[in-house]
Image (spheres, grey):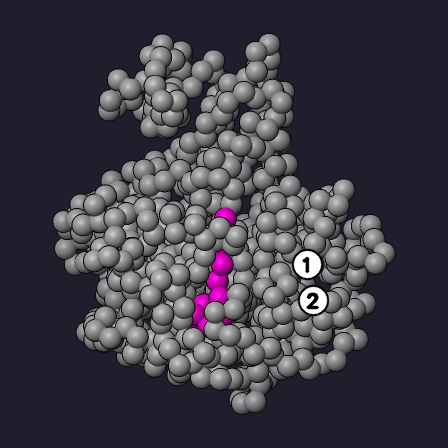
Amino acid sequence: MSKESSKTIESVLHEKRVFRPSEQVSDNARISSLDDYQNIYDLARKDPEKFWEEAARRELHWFKPFHQTLNWSNPPFAEWFSGGTTNISYNCLDRHITGPKANKTALIWEGEPGDVRQFTYKELHTDVCRTANALRTLGIKKGDLVALYMPMVPEAAIAMLACARIGAPHSVVFGGFSSDALRDRLIDGEAKAVITADGGFRKDKAVPLKKAVDAALSDGSCPTVKSVLVVQRTKEPIDMFSGRDHWWHELVPSQDEYCPAQQMESEERLFVLYTSGSTGKPKGVVHTTAGYNLWAHLTFQWIFDIKDNDIYWCTADVGWITGHSYIVYGPLSNGATTVMYEGAPRPSNPGAFWELIEKHKISIFYTAPTAIRAFMKTGREIPDKYDLSSLRLLGTVGEPINPEAWMWYREVIGGSKCPIVDTWWQTETGGVMISPLPGATPTKPGSATLPLPGIEADVVDSDGKSVEVEEGGYLVIKKPWPGMMRTIHGNPQRFKESYWEYLPFINGKPIYFAGDGARRDSDGYFWVMGRVDDVINVSGHRLGTMEIESALVSHPFVSEAAVVGRLDDLKGESIVAFVTLESGRDVNDQLFDELRSHVSKEIGSIARPDEIKFTDALPKTRSGKIMRRILRALASGEKISGDTSTLEDRSVLDKLRK
Ligand code: PRX
């Protein structure tokens, strides 16, 4: 278990505060009491297939109706809504433009330098159609994977919807990843095209993106990529390769303004999104058309209890699953107004978020605990300068939230009147799994509270048996749900083994476990304690320690490396690397900088170690396994507890302590 977890556990164990939804919030909510929630939950549990069938028919547009709700005959490979055809771009756009929402604002975008663009549903539809037609002229067909490596500009959302429109799965690669990391993903996904920008603005700086794409494609290392579509954003000089590279502003606007939405089979791929695991390279999580659409749609509706006049803002980047489900697909599928922001709070504008809330009269705000902790540190004087009275609901995602940050969020940002939805989920789950419903669920600071209808969550021991109340264990999901990942791109075996066969089968069926520990209290509330595997969570970014170790070891001076997380008040966890050097190499300050830059180059700056401890040897068991438990304790200056008798060479410990 990570250090962040142990801190959270300590503070949440003593947490007794309960905040009930106010009458005003409940009276206006779709699901307006705990009894209402319980009734829906029981209904879904009694007959899940009927529940999902009705929801899918009610909430999505079908070109052709499905004939089977769920095929779970070959677990964990689920098939949802077989026989049906639909399209998420149609559900997000076309079905709104024939009614009163045609001229409703779909997207408000705010650029880092303060430029604003707004799109009605009708306008967004036209832009998406034109982009879809442009992709076709580049030879992109249904089934071809298109990678996006974009800043947070409207074209990122437009490109995702355009890919979905023509049935070309997208693979969004976070713009903070390095060209090497991009190349790995392009190769693994066999991408046919890349959509990028000359650069993007981040914290008062222009960040080059096209250059990274050029580097990733250099030397013919990604032969499947035939074209690159480039949005002009920063106007920094870039190279354009004739025949391969095309400017968005030259190709897209001249296209026909209508492109029919491809009728997609329910289980055809919608996107691949890479995420870190405890072993090996990042895995391409596959989500498919109908089930994902339903899950993003329904969870968005439930959790944010969305109203027609809401202005909703999620601060994530579209490079992560939160951006997919809760900036683009969930809000647009529901016909909501979604806000997208290119930048981030920065020393020159620490009140950037609050300024935006005031300016656009944002009513729902969804962000990460790491951001809240950073705001706490700079003090309430900054948000206090702004009018935040438009807010009615707050959300958090990405990591456990400590009760102190939760309370600060509630009081300082929410004026003690806004419910907080602490939403637990993962890239793999497609959408939120455990969360309060604002009009129904009493909240407790630090708890994600109760599973959503249709989600059978539990906390179990290593035999797969439910643990007692207040006892820690593995957080599992016992039944399939529509938004679940379908496989790992190119590696179904890894999908099976790492998620569904980690714990013993129950009644002959596998249960889903994706790496988190949790406990339940006597009210059945879930308290998520963090990862129990070798994944660390740095400022809400998920990183595999193995990935960082591989990056370090690829440096010619490094012989071995072990990476662990250390509790960090701001980032949740920080990265500490233990490194042994090739013989004859000396430790010096320059090497520290060089290794950090090397990791930046291999993965991206988010993976750069905060500290590197050089050592002669790493503590290992006799079978050669690195004892990370010991390294974690050393990294945080704690006493090494537990059994150390399996250490191969006990003198290593003494040296490390020094
Ligand atoms: O450890 C959990 C943590 O983030 C992990 C999933 O990371 P990722 O796939 O990048 O998706 C992040 C956005 C959904 C989980 O395994 N996590 C996410 N939300 C919470 C959380 N931990 C505690 N509480 C949450 N609300």
Residue 343 in view, yes or no: no
Provide residue 430's location: percent of width, then percent of height.
Answer: 43, 61
Range drawn in magenta: 283-294
Amino acid, disc 1: Lys
Q: Which residue is mark 2?
A: 140
Q: Are marks 2 and 1 in contact (CB under 8 Å)?
A: yes
* Magenta-colored stretch includes residue 289: yes
x 66%, y 48%: residue: 204
Q: Quadrant of residue 166?
A: bottom right
- Tell me what residue is drawn at x 39 percent, y 25 percent: 626
In the foreground, 15 or 333: 333
Return the x and y of residue 95 as percentages of the image width and height: 53, 84
Residue type at mark 2 is Ile
Which numbered disc covers residue 83?
A: none
Q: Quadrant of residue 154?
A: bottom right
Q: Is residue 250 located in the magenta-colored stretch of the structure?
A: no
